Amino acid sequence: MAKSSGVVNKLNHDAAPEQKPQKLREIYANHLSKHGHDFISVAILVAALLALLTLSVWFAAYAWTHLGGDPVPIYGYVALAGGAVISLAVGGGLMALVFYSSRHGYDDLSGGDN
């Protein structure tokens, strides 16, 4: 049997049928006021991380264009792109093997930390 949420239990036990919509609004308003600060702190964290990402991309682009050196030949870009694609393919393949192993019970056969 599924476990019902605390809001539903509180609503069913604390309010008469005609008072349920008002009681539900009160419960959710109380819940939101308790957790409203979480949204603000997460928003500040996301904004700070986006600012760091923007700064790092700007610095990389600036350094790439303003530092001296020989120009990269076309085969250098091809090698760079090929290495990135192969790295992503190997990472994706390994993750697929992890999920396959987990879903088919191969991880349970080892008897490791039982």
Image (cartoon, rainbow, N blue to C red):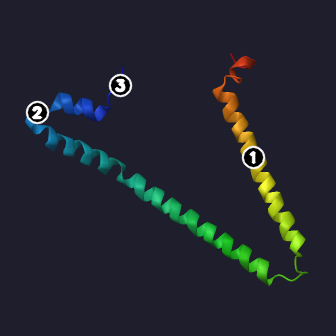
What is the quadrant of residue 28 in the picture?
top left
Q: Which label lies toward us, 1 or 2?
A: 1
Determine the residue positioned at 74% across, 42% down: 93
Q: Which numbered disc flags the more N-terminal residue, 3 or 2?
A: 3
Question: Tag 1, which secondary structure?
Answer: helix
For mark 2, give the secondary structure: helix
Say which residue appears at 15% left-offset and 42% top-offset: 21
Name the residue rendered at 77%, 78% in the picture.
63
- Disc 3 crowd, CA 10 A, few/some/many (<14, 14-19, 20+): few
Q: CA distance from mark 1 to mark 3?
A: 38 Å
Residue beneath disc 3: 3
Q: What amino acid is labelled 2 in the image?
A: Pro
Taking depth in this image into account, of 114 and 89 the one nearest to the observer is 89
Image spot of residue 71 (x, y percent): 88, 80
Image point (14%, 43%), residue name:
22
* Camera-nearest residue between 90 and 112: 90
> Residue flagged by tag 3: what amino acid is it?
Lys
Quarter of the image where the N terminus is located: top left
Q: Disc 3 versus disc 2: distance between alpha carbons?
A: 22 Å
- Screen quadrant of the C terminus: top right
Front residue of 52 and 18: 18
Q: Which residue is mark 2?
A: 17
Q: CA distance from mark 1 to mark 2?
A: 55 Å
**Where residue 112 sits: x, y (%)?**
73, 19
Which labelled disc corresponds to residue 91?
A: 1
Say whether disc 1 or disc 2 marks the residue closer to the N-terminus.
2
